[in-house]
Image (spheres, rainbow, N blue to C red):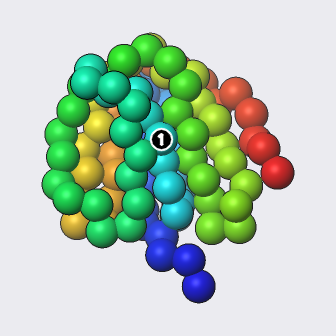
Amino acid sequence: MVNTYAVQVATPDNLLYEGEAQMMVVRTGEGEAAFLAQHARLVATLEPGQIRIVLEDGSEKVADLEGGFVHVHDNQVVVMASGGRLIEDRP
């Protein structure tokens, strides 16, 4: 079984994704960051661009975000973006 954690990706107008993931890749103000289960606590700014959410079955969800914040805590990743949209699912 793959270790997963809870993920929420939201904008002021929409909840883009809520569910479990085995990995998430985002671009922060300090560069690209990947989060796995049990990641250390973190709060960081997000640069505009794409994020990748890798699901338990290995498929991916990709969202294009306008920037915002990411908060990693207690085996959860919460992304609060100023705007964005889910652009594709990858098998």
Q: Is residue 26 visible?
A: yes
90 left or right of 23 in image: right
- Residue shown at the point (56%, 77%) measured from the top left: 2
x then y, percent, for residue 48: 43, 15
Mark 1, Cα crowd under 10 Å, few <14 / some 14-19 / many 20+, is some
Q: How many marks?
A: 1
**Which quarter of the figure has residue 16?**
top right
Asked if residue 25 is positioned above or below residue 82 in the image, the reply reads below
- Residue shown at the point (55%, 25%) measured from the top left: 50
x then y, percent, for residue 5: 42, 66
x then y, percent, for residue 25: 47, 41
View extreme (bottom): residue: 1
Front in this rendered view, residue 13 or 67: 67
**Which quarter of the figure has residue 56?**
bottom right
Q: Amino acid at mark 1?
A: Val
View extreme (right): residue: 91
- Residue shown at the point (20%, 59%) measured from the top left: 40
Front in this rendered view, residue 77 or 18: 77
Asked if residue 36 is positioned above or below residue 70 in the image, the reply reads below
Placement of the N terminus among the 4 image quadrants: bottom right
Front in this rendered view, residue 20 or 24: 24
31 left or right of 41 in image: right
- Residue shown at the point (41%, 60%) measured from the top left: 36
* Circle 1: element type: strand
Task: Give the residue number, with chain letter if any, for mark 1.
Answer: 25
69 left or right of 23 in image: left
x then y, percent, for residue 46: 33, 24
Q: Is residue 82 visible?
A: no
